[in-house]
Image (spheres, rainbow, N blue to C red):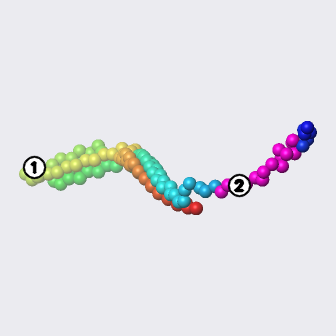
Amino acid sequence: MLKPQWILIAVFVGSPATAQVVTPNFTTGTVNSTTTATQNITETYRIETYGGTQYSVTGSNVTPTGNLGPSATYAVTDATKDFSYSQVKLDAGIISTTDLTRTITTTSVTNSLSVFSQ
């Protein structure tokens, strides 16, 4: 009868081990990628123009009565001729306000190509 120690030795001593060659399933390949990014920027501006008090009078064929200024009165000099008269008074403060809005759109496209081979 065989002793248990000899059976274990026979199992481990068995036939020699061999390796098999592994060959990949591909030879070449490519990866193509496109990335698109869009950015929108909206800008809003408010422009306010300030000024001091302004007063002006213009005309032709008119004559002021009394002191010149906002309280003066004007009369036509020669009623047989044409006349013109303009009076402008602006108080101190905001003279004009301008509101502007603009949108800036930026688009960037990135193309990437990777090629690999064995």
- The foreground one among 109 and 75 is 109
- Taking the magenta stretch, the answer to whether it contains residue 16 is yes
Q: Residue at x 33, y 45 (%)?
A: 90
Q: Is residue 92 visible?
A: no
State the extent of the magenta-drawn residues as a range.
7-21
The image quarter in which residue 11 lies? top right
Residue at the disc numbered 2: 19
Q: Is residue 46 left or right of residue 116?
A: left
SS type, badge 2: loop
| Badge 2: residue crowd in 10 Å (few <14, some 14–19, many ≥20) | few
Marker disc for residue 79: 1
Quadrant occupied by the N terminus? top right
Question: Where residue 66 is drawn, which disc sits there?
Answer: none
Amino acid type at mark 2: Ala
Q: Is residue 15 above or below residue 113?
A: above
Q: Which structural element holds mark 1?
A: loop
